[in-house]
Structures are given as C-alpha cells and as structure tokens.
Image: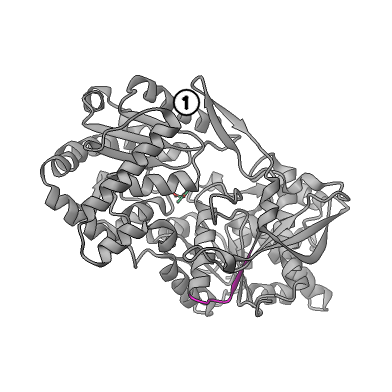
Amino acid sequence: MEKRPRVGYLCMEWGLDPSLPLYAGGLGILAGDILKAAYDLRFPMVGVGILWRQGYVRQVVEDGRVIDAYPRYDDVRLQLQETGVDVTVEIRRRPVRIKVWRLDGRSRPEGARHAPLFLLDTDLPDNADRWITGQLYGWFGEERVAQEMVLGIGGVRALQALGLEPELFHFNEGHAVLAGLELIRQGMEQGLPFEQAWQAARRRIVFTTHTPVKEGNEVHPLDLLEYMGAFCGLNRRQMIRIGGDPFQMTVAALRLARAANGVSELHGRTARRMWADVTNAPPIQGITNGVHVPTWQDPQMAAAYASGEDLWAVHQSLKQELIDFVERRTGVRLALDRLLIGFARRAAPYKRADLIFRDPDVIGPLLESGRVQIIFSGKAHPLDDRGHEIVQSLIAMQRRYPRAVVFLPDYDMAIARMVTRGADVWLNNPRRPMEASGTSGMKAAINGVLNLSVLDGWWPEACRHGENGWQIGGGYEGPDADAHDARSLYETLMGEVLPAYEGDRARWVRMMRESIASVVERFSASRMLQRYAEALYRGGAAEPVAGR
Ligand SMILES: *Cc1c(COP(=O)(O)O)cnc(C)c1O
C-alpha cells in the first residue's frame, strides 16, 4: 500500500514500455518518464490513466498504402493487479462502472521502475457503455467527452476510493479538466458556495499545456457537455466563467489551476502570447521537458562516456544493430560507413517530414550516391488525412531512392529507442514555433547522436552550433519558411555535417561527447521533476487573482 501521495498526475496516455500500448506520442512518453523519475527520486506521486482496450492505432504498409489497424490488447491486463476498487460516473444519464487497475512499477527491471499507475477501465460485462475506454484518440466528440469524464471525474473518485487522495492534481494537457469540476462539485456538496469551492479546488491543481496551435486545443459545445453530464452540478453560467462558450479545455484548465507551465522556454513564451487575453489565469511558466535517462540512453554508451572510453566503437555497434533491425523489418541493407540520418516522429504536417526532399536537384545526388542515408518512421493520427498523405509521400521516397531511404511503419517506443541511439544525426525540422518541446532530440543527444535541428522547442536552450550539434534556420518565423529552412538545411548538411562526418572523425567524436555532456543532466526527467516540485508543486507560483 502506498503512502498518501503529494501529487496525482492525470494523463490520457502513458508511455512506460513498448509492451504497454497505452500511448500515442510525446505526451504519453513524457508522463511515463516522469513516473519513472518519481520512483528514482522517491517523490510521492501516483499516475492515473486509462486502460485502452485497443491502444492507439497501429499502422501497416501494404503495396505502398497505409492501413490502420486496431488489435485488442487483452494480455495487457496480465501485467496489472486488481485493486478491488471500482467507482461509478454517470455519463449520458447512465451509470458507468469503472474498474480501477494498478500497475506496480516496483517489480520491473532496474532502470524501468516507476511510481504506481492506476488505470481506469469501463470494459466490463455489466456496462452498457463498455467501449468508452476502447480507443485512444479514436472516434469523435461525444466519445471523447465520455473518455474525459472517465479520466477526470473517474480519476478523482478512484484515488479517493483507494484512500490515496493527493494534495495536488497535475493535469498533463487539458484532457483531465473535468477533475477540476468534480472537485468543485464536492466542495459545494460540503456546503461551500460555488466561488469558494472553485478557489479551494484551484489551490490543488496545476496544469501543463503542450499545444502551441489554437486549433489543437480541444473545444466542446456546452450543450454537449450538459447532455453528457459533464457539468458536475455546475450551472451554465458557472461553466462559462470557467471555460467560455463553447467550452475551451485549455482556458478551463488555466482557470482551474493555481500554476501552469509550457514545456520549454520558447513554448512558455508562445503559450503566454496565445492565452494572453484569458482573464483569471495563472502566469504560464516555461519548464523544459526532460527524458528518463536510464530508459533512453544505451547502457554501453553511458559506460563509455563515464569512463572516458572511445565513443565511436560503441556508436558503430549501435548503428550496426539499427541497420540489422531495419533489414529485418524492411529488407533494405544500409551501409555502416555512410552518414545515417534519423527522423522519427508523429506524422503531423508542421513537423515537415518531407522538407529534405524539397529540392530533388540538391538532395537527389546525395541519396543516389549513397553519401546520405535516411531512416524515417512515423504514424498518422487515424482521423488526419494530411498525416496519412505524409506517410504516403515518405513511402514514395523510399521507392524512388530504394538504397538510401527507408520508412519503418508503426512508429512506437521500440523504434524510437533503436533510431535515437543508432543514427549518426537526428534531423528535426518543424515549422517554428510549433514544436513545443521535442523530446526525441534529447534521447538522441544523450546517445551521442548529433542534433541537426530548427531552433524550436528545447533546442534553442541547448544548441551550440558546431560544438554539440547544429541549428537550422536561425530562428526564422517569417514568410516562405519552408523554402528558407530547406535552404538552410542543405547548406548545413553539405557545408558542415558531411565534411565533419567524412573528413574529421576526431571532431565528430568530440561533438558526440559534448552532445551527451550538455544534455544528459540538464534535460533529464529527474531535473524536470525537481523543477516541477520547486515551481509548481511547492506553491512557488503566485496565487491567482480572481477576476483580474
Ligand atoms: C520520444 C517519443 C516521442 C516524442 O518525440 P518528439 O520529438 O516530440 O516527436 C513520440 N513518440 C515516441 C514513440 C517517442 O518515443
């Protein structure tokens, strides 16, 4: 049995291990890395999430086409423990029973242990609405609200029923917002007027925002929320004061939290600008993400770095492992002694996976001669047609340059782990300032894989051009950014990266060492959790002023 935790960390997705397909991307990996850091630092935290029956979409490629698949993950339950606890939430005026499972992180191998995670599950034989916890980010509005009711309202009730009610609730993204309304409802039930119940709830909530695009922030019609039962006993006027009409989840989260943060310094500034006209919000700080080092740094590389040994030999063996992995999966055999670029991330348009192909006259000869090889991986959101087109276009490039370009379908933690340790260079070219953080670059950096990246997300804080990696684009945010950044990418690739790789091994290895040195502590999940403790959890943030 746990002690009562200080923090209950609520997140829609959890990326703890490749065998637990409960995540879609960076948001979930971040949550998983924090829970591991909490274990390492003995920080009193528990996680709350959802036991997704079909996980997130899986993608296979057949005849050059992407096909979405949703297998059932029945055996995931074998890794979980019964808590004997279930809670009920009324959704669409019907009681939905939610079973609470426990994932005990202490029994995992060293380096992968984590604080406890409680998973909510509606897939029970006596539930009419058992499919609510079916698919992560699948389906549309009504189902999404039902899922958010399970996470938020169900999450609060689950921790209370377990005897683990935390001092603080940390909302990782706006999906958990209804937890705040549930706390207000409970305050009013105990006799507090709405205003006081709101303030009392607010003293117990902190919020991390991740999405630097307005359209990426979820909005729900009030009528829908009312019909679903998501008002939690509040009236329409009170709901509008918190989230507006229509109800904006990020606005509501800001007005329910006593402290908030974006996930890098640059993203903190972007978020402050985006939400500047939201009254009654706490200041949005910039607290840069970090990665769980034992999860993401290869142990041989860590050992070689620590003892001052030759990093090159270790790197080459990791690269060979990646090359073998690619051959097993795709049949393509890449060359060990030629520059290998890695690019693996969700197939979102702003990430511009195909930017490097913009001018075939420049990139074509480099690929045809085999001087440059690229491994891509990525998954498109099931409802995102543009994302599917991006994957499709990468597959077309693989056909066009069959010896130099490979696409690995079904991007997941296992692929991320292989590519962020086995490539020579980690390419990242989002349209600035849309990449809030970009933790895959940190994973690469701590393995001595050199970042070649637009100055977006975390990279402006870490980059020393030509010493621990390279920047692209000089922070440009003006018109024709694609043409501008592609030109800069080509110049740096041909003028600096290739000459260093092909001509100056000693310099390359110095840069690898510098890459690890400058990132491994400053951008670790432990450091991030310590910053959260100081700046969010310790009441370090200013108390919000009602009404401003
Ligand atoms: C680290 C990771 C991410 C996040 O990386 P970004 O740099 O934000 O794209 C996404 N998906 C997986 C599987 C990861 O391991």
Please name whichever residue, 174 or 213, is drawn nearer the observer in this view of the structure. Answer: 174
In magenta segment, residue 96: no
Q: Is mark 1 within 8 Å of ligand 1?
A: no
Residue 122 x, y percent position in the rendering: 78, 52
Residue 97 x, y percent position in the rendering: 83, 57
Residue 475 x, y percent position in the rendering: 29, 49
User: Looking at the image, which residue is at 30% across and 56% down?
Assistant: 460
User: Looking at the image, which residue is at 52% across and 80% down?
Assistant: 538
> Which quadrant is the N terminus positioned in?
bottom right
Using residue 191 as the reference point, say whether residue 434 is left or right of it. left
Residue 75 x, y percent position in the rendering: 68, 48
Instruction: Report the residue marked by disc 1.
Output: 392
> In the picture, residue 107 is in which quadrant?
bottom right
Please name whichever residue, 97 or 36, is drawn nearer the observer in this view of the structure. Answer: 36
What residue range appears in magenta?
41-47
User: Looking at the image, which residue is at 72% across and 51% down?
Assistant: 147
